[in-house]
Image (spheres, rainbow, N blue to C red):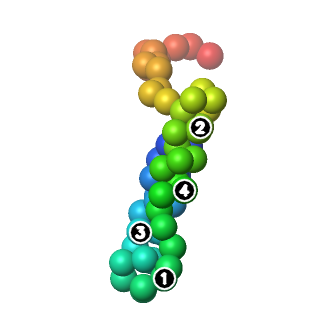
Amino acid sequence: MTLGIDIGVIKMIITHAAAVHGLDISPEPVDLARVALKRLGLIGKGTERDRRPHDG
């Protein structure tokens, strides 16, 4: 999994905990973390890979 997907899963769990279990927790810090990581260049769109078979 990529870091971006992991952050999305964390946000989903926090949102679920707040909605279903009534915990006093906000998913907003996850959004802020995503913006910070994007600005730092640690997450972003993936690059296309060459998937041609090769000997070796």
Q: Position of residue 30 (x, y in %)?
A: 52, 54
The residue under the point 41% across, 68% down is 15
Which of the two discs, 4 and 3, labels the residue nearer the N terminus?
Answer: 3
Q: Earlier in the sequence, mark 1 or mark 3?
A: 3
Give the amino acid at mark 3: Thr
Disc 3 packing (10 Å; few <14; some 14–19; many ≥20): some
Which tag, 4 or 2, sits closer to the chain's start? 4
- Measure the alpha-carbon separation of dots 4 and 3: 12 Å
Q: Which residue is mark 2?
A: 37
| Image: 7 above or below 38 | below
Q: Label 2 near label 3: C-beta < 8 Å?
A: no
Label 4 or label 2, whichever lies nearer to me, is: 4
Residue 29 occupies quadrant: bottom right
Foreground residue, 22 or 1? Answer: 22
Q: Residues under labels 3 and 2: Cα distance?
A: 20 Å
The residue that mark 1 highlights is: 23
Q: With 52 as the anchor, is 41 left or right in this view?
A: right
Q: Secondary structure at mark 3?
A: helix
Q: Give the label on residue 29, or none.
A: 4
The mark nearer the N terminus, 1 or 4, is 1
Mark 3 or mark 2, earlier in chain: 3
Q: Residue 54 has which mark?
A: none
Instruction: Identify residue type, mark 4.
Output: Pro
Measured from the top left, where is residue 45 in percent x and y?
45, 27
Q: Give me the C-alpha separation between circle 4 and circle 2.
A: 12 Å
Q: Depth-wise, is mark 4 or mark 3 nearer the camera?
A: 4
Against 48, is 38 above or below?
below
At label 2, which amino acid type do we have? Leu
Q: In this figure, which residue is indicated by the disc labeled 3?
A: 15
